[in-house]
Image (cartoon, grey):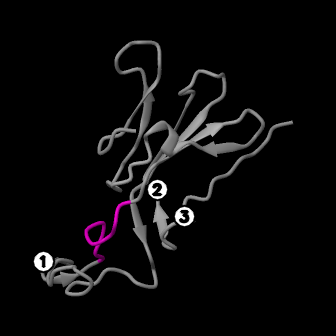
Amino acid sequence: MARHLSFEWFYLSRTQGQRSSPAGATWGDYDRDGFLDLFVSGYAKFDPDNPPLAGKGGVPPGFCQFRGVTVMCGPRGLPGESDHLFHNNGNGTFTDVSVKAGVSDPRGYYALAPVFVDVDNDGWLDCWSPTTPC
């Protein structure tokens, strides 16, 4: 019998109380235990009730304009989101090991499309993202 796992892409950040929007995810067996683990790159925190507005909350006037038209102010004006590495426990559950593995991105850089690949040809999968090391 196949199990269906789902992850909600927009989730409530446990620490900030804001919605966050991951920009990508990749599956790979980073610890070579035979189970696929999941890395989710964080992009930006977004609170739809308090969107960034030009001239308010530290966002400079005119910052959210394109050719003189006011537009969505993001990701500029939005704080970055941390990244998450979920270890596959082998029983249909996952554990967030981001901090333990050193890939949580506490500075909250905008991360995009991560990938597991053996970059240095040492036989171990490396996690790579264009904007932040994972």
Return the x and y of residue 85 as percentages of the image width and height.
Answer: 53, 42
Q: Nearer the viewer, residue 98 or 49?
A: 98
Residue 10 bears which disc, if any?
3
SS for callout 1: loop
Residue 3 magenta-highlighted:
no
Q: In the image, what residue occupies the spot 55% across and 58% down? A: 9
- Residue type for callout 1: Arg
Residue identified by numbered label 2? 22
Whole-angstrom CA distance, mark 1 to mark 3, is 30 Å
Residue 112 bears which disc, if any?
none
Magenta portion: prevailing SS class: loop
- Residue 86 position by quadrant: top right
Which quadrant is the N terminus positioned in?
top right
- State whether residue 103 is above or below residue 17: above
SS for callout 3: loop
Residue identified by numbered label 1? 67
Range drawn in magenta = 72-80
